[in-house]
Image: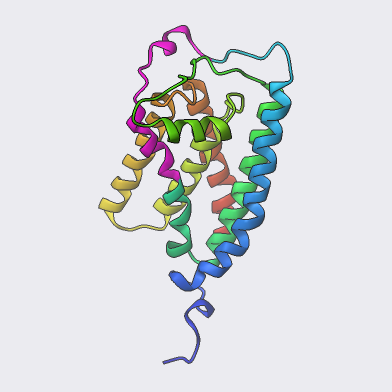
Amino acid sequence: MTGKSPPSRPGYRGIHNLPEYVRLALPVGVLFALVYFSMNWVTARRTGNYHLYFDWELAIPFIPPMIYAYASIAVLVLLPAFTLTINQLHALARAVVITLLVAALGYLLLPADLGFERPAYVPGYDPVYQALYALEMPHNLLPSLHIACSTLLIAALLNDSASRWIRLGLLLWGAIICASVLLVHQHHVLDVVSGLLLGIATYRLAYLRVIR
């Protein structure tokens, strides 16, 4: 026994890191809300917004149950609290902030409108979708913050996992989230691609550089 509490060990991962995770997550969450809602508000009042999608994308089916895969990002956001070290949590918070600021610039430069028409009623899922539509106006599209943040989080978790099965599971989870944003008609293909690129870039340039 060293007499030290678990968080005092540099490589500690576990529930004792939760207070520091919360301390970091609160300001990042406030920044997310400011960026997301302010950019949507600005774009909704602009004219001549771009249509950043291909015509064939409008034939992508709407699959209501995929909302669960879409919402699974909430679980993904919590995992670092129990699996990363304090230093890694700080690096991740910084990378998320950079991701938000770059995305905000994208929304200002490329104000866009969603090509899909949102249904007035979704049988069996209507309360969930109405809540989603109330929170997410159809303008913050390219890059997809949903995909950028998911990619960044999964990359950080992949970097810290030695298990082949966990790594495969994380990659599959990421692929399902990418499919979900299309199948619940929240994003288009270019949004997904740009979100992936942004997430990978901030992982490599902001997260890895700090932890190394």
Image: magenta residue range: 53-73
* Overall secondary structure of the magenta section: helix
Seen from the viewer's position, the closer of residues 166 and 59 is 59
Seen from the viewer's position, the closer of residues 127 and 13 is 127
- Quadrant holding the N terminus: bottom left
The vertical placement of 163 against 175, above or below, is below
Q: Residue at x 43, y 57 (%)?
A: 79
Q: Residue at x 47, y 20 (%)?
A: 120
Seen from the viewer's position, the closer of residues 29 and 108 is 29
Q: From the top left corner, tell me how far across and down residue 65 is, in percent.
A: 33, 32
Q: Quadrant of residue 73?
A: top left
Visible residue check, residue 12: no
Visible residue check, residue 32: yes
Seen from the viewer's position, the closer of residues 98 and 55 is 55
The vertical placement of 143 against 99, above or below, is above
Q: Residue at x 67, y 14 (%)?
A: 49
Residue 120 counted in the magenta span: no
Q: Is residue 134 left or right of residue 38?
A: left
The vertical placement of 200 against 179, above or below, is below
Q: Residue furthest left?
A: 165
Q: From the top left corner, tell me how far across and down residue 74 is, in percent.
A: 46, 48
- Quadrant holding the C terminus: bottom right
Q: Residue at x 57, y 29 (%)?
A: 143
Q: Is residue 80 left or right of residue 210?
A: left
